[in-house]
Image (cartoon, rainbow, N blue to C red):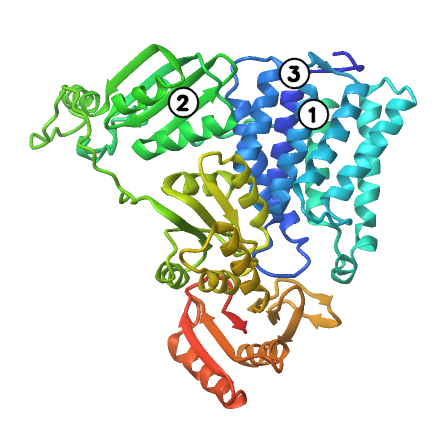
């Protein structure tokens, strides 16, 4: 192996090693969350983002640099979750833009690629903040440029030095963000980036690393019904036809079109595999109507290597075969037909009528879901604080809605970037992302909507509506720390306001009352309280009486939210 460059095979292995290293350390990175809440998710979000790309890389059948870069960029873009995941996807996107056109990476190319990665990531963030993953990435880029300009030619030394410098920058992040210093942690996103680079470097240096990526979908040609040792009814096979083919592309097939095609396949079946390169697309889907998949595919080009298997019939035949050996009992009451019958047009989701305006809200908890639906939300995405939806999740939701204007309410500051990324990938609808950072802000935005007004006017009205909302959430601490001059012990209840800790204590009701005191001012008229899945209704009503007694001049509402982890979510307006 040359120590002056990296080829596509080595780069592929290094990327997978970096992804696996992050996966193994995600819980540690989660614990670096500034607020010691039980849902610290930076490690999880970054891992799900990079593993989405790793699965695409693991499926590659060619070893050219262009295909590799497309898999890394496209996979991470679709799988991006949370701010840290979106930024990581943009770093990978910028890096691969440069290296996709070369056969090998030497140090000058890597320096340029690092610079492009940082440029792309900074552009994706509306208000970049120093002391974060962006700062660490910028430090790495600066060091890479310095080494390249100095004439460094040894790749191992080059990568080793930029990792060492990246760690130095990471250790300085608490000096750039006081909240990190108070919490006694480095930036979790920056730490995640360094973990990826270290994993990649370990493999390059010869360390034995497991780069196997577990694929959840079915590989083409391998059926989920290959095992007949279990007594499974053929009628339990939801989608009866295993359909495989290759599209010989005659038109462009960019990332957006690939995502659209996958979303369509998911709407008519399961066990989706769709692997694209510049000339062909390999497709595998289990569906009840192969004709629908084929008809859609023909929009992109001609088809070859077509194969359609009736899985119900195959299952029946194998049951008979094994019954002859005395292994299984064959049910005679299950009708099996080898004749292909198109689906009757039934859909699991109701068909939407065309609308001028439609709404998508990210929500968490069955009570919250119902509240959003009652306010006119067309489609609710389960996610929120405990599990951020990916760019692809939001994009798929947008595609399902038939409307001229689609308003997206992220309802979490860690989902706004992914929502904006989905907006940028949508070409057939006007997507408006209202930057709601909390559930109460999302509710206020919907109330601020004025039917009949233009999308631009409603964007303004809804954005203005969220400015008057103060939000608070009550959960428990998972570690000892000190934030906002408050000593926090593991197990304490915490009342978290818009960016700061408002109350800490060992008694839940007292923390809620103290948090509300910190939210209420002379202009407050209404307090809304949403109790979570771990709170009994009787306890919530008991707390309500305490709040009413203390704030007799305010209107106070109590509703069931059903959210996990957060005992109460409160808004003041």
Are the residues tagged 2 and 1 within 8 Å (C-beta)? Answer: no
Q: Is residue 64 above or below residue 144?
A: above
Reading the chain from its start, which is encountered first: label 3 or label 1?
Answer: 3
Q: Nearer the viewer, mark 2 or mark 1?
A: 2
CA–CA distance in space, label 3 to label 2: 23 Å
Residue holding disc 2: 219
Reading the chain from its start, which is encountered first: label 2 or label 1?
Answer: 1
Local secondary structure at mark 2: loop
Q: Nearer the viewer, mark 3 or mark 1?
A: 3
Residue holding disc 3: 8
CA–CA distance in space, label 3 to label 1: 14 Å
Residue 234 location, quadrant: top left
The residue shown at (75%, 51%) is 186
Local secondary structure at mark 3: helix
Q: In this view, does 375 lie above or below 509?
A: above
Expressed as whole percent of the image width and height from the top left, the position of residue 435 reads 57, 54
The residue shown at (21%, 24%) is 315
Mark 1 closeness class: few <14, some 14–19, many ≥20 residues within 10 Å: many
The C terminus lies in which quarter of the figure?
A: bottom right
């Amino acid at each position: 192996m040359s120590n002056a460059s990296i080829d596509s095979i080595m780069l592929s292995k290094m990327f997978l090693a970096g992804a696996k290293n992050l996966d193994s350390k995600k819980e540690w990175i989660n614990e670096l969350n500034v607020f010691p809440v039980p849902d610290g998710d930076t490690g999880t979000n970054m891992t799900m983002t990079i593993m989405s790309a790793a699965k695409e890389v693991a499926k590659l059948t060619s070893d050219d640099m262009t295909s590799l870069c497309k898999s890394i960029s496209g996979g991470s873009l679709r799988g991006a979750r949370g701010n840290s995941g979106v930024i990581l996807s943009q770093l990978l996107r910028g890096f691969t833009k440069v290296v996709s056109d070369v056969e090998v990476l030497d140090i000058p190319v890597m320096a340029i690629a690092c610079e492009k990665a940082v440029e792309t990531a900074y552009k994706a963030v509306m208000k970049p903040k120093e002391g974060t993953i962006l700062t660490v990435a910028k430090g790495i880029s600066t060091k890479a440029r310095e080494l390249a300009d100095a004439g460094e030619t040894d790749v191992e030394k080059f990568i080793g030095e930029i990792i060492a410098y990246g760690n130095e920058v990471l250790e300085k992040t608490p000096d750039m963000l006081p909240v990190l210093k108070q919490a006694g942690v480095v930036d979790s996103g920056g730490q995640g980036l360094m973990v990826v680079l270290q994993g990649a470097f370990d493999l390059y240096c010869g360390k034995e690393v497991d780069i196997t990526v577990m694929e959840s979908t079915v590989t083409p040609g391998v059926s989920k019904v290959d095992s007949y040792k279990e007594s499974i009814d053929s009628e339990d096979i939801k989608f009866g036809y295993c359909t495989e083919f290759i599209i010989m592309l005659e038109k462009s097939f960019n990332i957006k079109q690939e995502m659209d095609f996958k979303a369509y396949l998911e709407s008519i079946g399961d066990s989706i595999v769709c692997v694209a390169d510049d000339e062909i697309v390999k497709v595998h889907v289990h569906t009840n109507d192969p004709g629908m998949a084929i008809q859609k595919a023909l929009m992109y080009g001609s088809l070859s290597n077509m194969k359609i298997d009736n899985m119900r019939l195959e299952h029946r035949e194998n049951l008979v075969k094994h019954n002859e050996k005395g292994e299984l009992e064959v049910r005679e009451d299950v009708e099996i037909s080898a004749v292909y019958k198109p689906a009757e047009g039934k859909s699991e989701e109701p068909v939407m009528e065309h609308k001028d305006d439609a709404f998508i809200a990210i929500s968490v908890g069955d009570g919250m879901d119902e509240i959003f639906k009652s306010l006119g939300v067309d489609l609710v995405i389960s996610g929120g604080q405990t599990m951020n939806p990916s760019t692809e999740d939001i994009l798929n939701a947008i595609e399902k809605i038939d409307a001229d204007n689609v308003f997206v309410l992220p309802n979490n500051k860690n989902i706004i970037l992914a929502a904006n990324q989905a907006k940028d990938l949508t070409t057939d609808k006007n997507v408006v992302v209202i930057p709601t950072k909390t559930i109460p802000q999302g509710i206020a935005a919907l109330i601020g909507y004025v039917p009949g007004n233009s999308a631009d006017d409603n964007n303004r009205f809804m954005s203005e509506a969220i400015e008057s909302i103060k939000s608070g959430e009550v959960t428990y601490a998972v570690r000892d720390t000190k934030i906002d001059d408050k000593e926090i012990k593991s197990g304490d209840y915490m009342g978290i306001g818009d960016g700061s800790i408002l109350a800490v204590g060992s008694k839940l009701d007292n923390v809620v009352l103290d948090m509300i005191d910190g939210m209420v001012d002379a202009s407050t008229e209404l307090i809304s309280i949403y109790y979570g899945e771990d709170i009994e209704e009787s306890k919530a009503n008991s707390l309500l009486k305490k709040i009413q007694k203390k704030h007799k001049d305010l209107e106070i509402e109590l509703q069931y939210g059903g959210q996990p982890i957060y005992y109460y979510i409160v808004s003041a307006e």
